[in-house]
Amino acid sequence: MRSRLLLLSTQVAVALVGITSLATAQAIRSGFNTTSDGRNDDGTYTAPLGCTSAANGGTCVGSAVGIGFSGNFFGTNFNSLFLNTNGNATINGPQSTFTPFALTAGGINPIFAPFFADVDTRPAGSAVLTFGSGTVDGHTAFGVNWPGVGYYQSHADKLDVFQLVLIDRSDTGSGNFDFEFNYGNMLWETGDASGGSGGLGGQCAAAGYSNGLSGAANRSLELTGSHVCGALINGGANALMTHDLNNDVLGRYLFSVRGGQVVSATPEPGTYFLVLSGLAGIGLVARRRRRAA
């Protein structure tokens, strides 16, 4: 009996590892990496000889990067983004804040934030931010990768893999687009300066978007588990890599913007189980769909 239980446990573990690997491979889109940022902490990508200096006493504060098409985001028309090391991209200017604030609060820079936390790409074991243009299902697209990045202060013992992809859908109307948050392994949630220890605890990461406006004009969303320590990383109740939104790919969160509004339907939460049985043993695969807050 003991040997049979050991065999069953091994088979279940192998099955789950296989599914996790498949989820990672499917969610993160390949490419979008023709340009690399330099190693930095709290920075914004700065094009060679293209930084804005006047606003910061002669210090470069980042460059807007063209995305190759135009989008209408709650009435804000944009064709470029500021790509910020700390897990987000903004429309109206760079964003260097490292401790995640409430994306739903309003009065902020319009933002797409797949994982807003204190990323630090200075250690040699960390990857750096990359970006580039490509296509998704025949549509022009622009992607930003955080392909295994460390956390403050110069830690690379745990790395996070995530991606932002914007997809031109002007075929459905002027300014229409989709955007995706895509995730691989997510192992840390906080930098040292945000009260974290070993990448965990303190003031933890948030994921979502905002049009930046206040009051009744505010249009924003945070994924369930934002600011909740332990929730978004691997093994958490709302683990980003093992949930999905508005599509069937684990680790992918899809939002459609039509007429300047996010119109994606939001599925109800639930849990689906598929039991695989056979002479060789049994594997259990848990698939959980998640709902945004």
Image (cartoon, grey):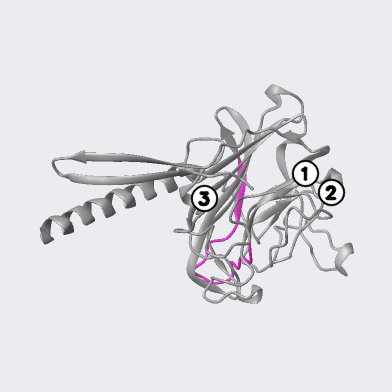
Q: Position of residue 119 (x, y in %)?
A: 61, 65
Residue type of the residue flagged with mark 3:
Tyr
Q: Nearer the viewer, mark 2 or mark 3?
A: 2
Q: Residues within 10 Å of mark 1 (few under 14, many from 20)?
A: many
Q: Is residue 124 magenta?
A: yes
The tag on residue 213 is: 2
Nearest to the observer: residue 63 or residue 253? 253
User: Residue tagged by mark 3?
Assistant: 183
Nearest to the observer: residue 11 or residue 216? 216
Find the distance from the CA under tag 2 to the CA under tag 3: 27 Å
Residue type of the residue flagged with mark 1:
Arg
Q: Which contiguous range is marked in magenta?
A: 117-133
Mark 3 residue element = strand
Q: Is residue 27 left or right of residue 260?
A: left
Q: Is residue 213 magenta?
A: no
Q: Is residue 82 left or right of residue 290?
A: right
Q: Position of residue 179 (x, y in %)?
A: 64, 39
Residue at image coords 74%, 64%: 96
Residue type of the residue flagged with mark 2:
Leu
Residue at image coords 49%, 56%: 237
Marks 1 and 2 close (CB-CB < 8 Å): yes
User: Residue tagged by mark 1?
Assistant: 219
Q: Is residue 189 left or right of residue 286?
A: right
**Earlier residue among tags 1 and 2:** 2
Q: Main secondary structure of the magenta part?
A: loop
**Earlier residue among tags 2 and 3:** 3
**Earlier residue among tags 3 and 1:** 3
Q: Position of residue 57 (x, y in %)?
A: 88, 70
Mark 1 residue element = loop
Q: Residues within 10 Å of mark 2 (few under 14, many from 20)?
A: some
